[in-house]
Image (spheres, grey):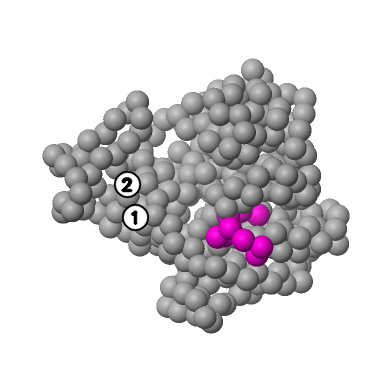
Amino acid sequence: MALDVLTIGDPTIDTSIRIHDAHVALQVHPERAELHIDYADKIPVDEMYRSTGGNCVNAARAARRLGLDVAVYGVTGDDLDGRWIRQELAHARVDTSLMAVDRKRSTNASIALIFRGERTLFVWHQPRHYHLPVLPETAWIYATSVGPLGPAISDLHSALLRALRHQPAARLAFSPGTHQLRMGAKAIAPMLCATELLLLNREEAEELTCRPKAEPRELLQRLHALGPRKVVMTDGIRGSYGYDGERYLRTGVLKMPVVDRTGAGDSYGATVMTALHLGLDLGTAMAWGTAQAAFVVSALGAAPGLVDRRRLQAVVGEHPGLVAKAF
């Protein structure tokens, strides 16, 4: 079995709860991006949506939607939620044969509180032991969030790096999660040096470089100095930035109604990786990621908004300004 991409991370069950802005107990302070809810109040819910998710699952579905042969490695509980994740991936024609089952602990879960298109996440991650199986030949490995913080993350990183040494043609896309970032740049330096494509949002970039409020060029340069060949940083409504060691690139956003931002970063990253796999340049790859993320945020949940390769090509053709330019 040969793959285009293997995603690695923690699958979860996501519950999205959407509330409206008419309730008197809710106050938003845009300058501080805070949502205030009166303690012990009962908040009306407009919509509730339960879905399979986790960064590795979201990225796998995005890459599969674009026509790649995809598998997932992750650990679920031996429960209904774990079986549901496998069924949903199989339905999307994503290979689940490498996934593992933890018979002592349940499947991870998260709750997303969605308000005006933005979300606040409550995340529950079980402690895991990761035993990476012998990996099939693959063009890309997309490594993302695992946790909680502990030696299991380092063990997984070491196993992944050994697998990459046995597959010198495989390229690594790395989108570290919260617990990996908290380890610090020095602890994850071997992963960063093996990375072809590093994917972060601005807050994560500032945390990893210890440079809060730094300008995009400085952040990109500092991230690139940590070892990855290409760096892409998203920055919300300000678009995204890239750097390949030669060119600093920037693109804006594709304006579409925002319903839910769940999965936007995963779809962006997996789509950029897919475009690079297909031989496109980094500026065009960023345009593809931008368009895919716009479709994802226009629907509730991480998967319903995903579009195929033909649709992305058409959208970028209609909006040539999305192709990232030097800045």
Q: Which residues are magenta?
A: 143-152
Label 2 crowd (10 A; few <14 / some 14-19 / many >=20): many
- Foreground: 1 or 327? 327
Q: Mark number for residue 16?
A: 1
For the question of whether residue 317 can be seen, the reply is no
- SS under mark 1: strand
The C terminus is located in which quarter?
Answer: top right
The N terminus is located in which quarter?
Answer: bottom right
**Amino acid found under the numbered disc labelled 2:** Ile
Label 1 crowd (10 A; few <14 / some 14-19 / many >=20): many
- Foreground: 99 or 270? 99
> Where residue 82 sits: x, y (%)?
48, 74
**Is residue 150 shown in magenta?**
yes
Q: Is residue 315 above or below residue 95?
A: above
Q: Mark number for residue 114?
A: 2
The mark nearer the N terminus, 2 or 1, is 1
- SS under mark 2: strand
Dominant SS in magenta: loop
Q: Is residue 267 above or below residue 98?
A: above
- Name the image quarter holding residue 269: top right
Marks 2/1: CA distance? 7 Å
Q: Is residue 165 left or right of residue 181?
A: right
Mark 1 and mark 2 in contact (Cβ < 8 Å)?
yes
**Is residue 82 shown in magenta?**
no
> Where residue 146 sits: x, y (%)?
58, 59
- Name the image quarter holding residue 128: bottom right
Q: Residue at x 84, y 53 (%)?
A: 169
**Amino acid found under the numbered disc labelled 1:** Ser
Q: Is residue 213 above or below residue 158?
A: above
Q: Residue at x 65, y 54 (%)?
A: 143
For the question of whether residue 111 can be seen, the reply is yes
Q: Residue at x 32, y 50 (%)?
A: 113
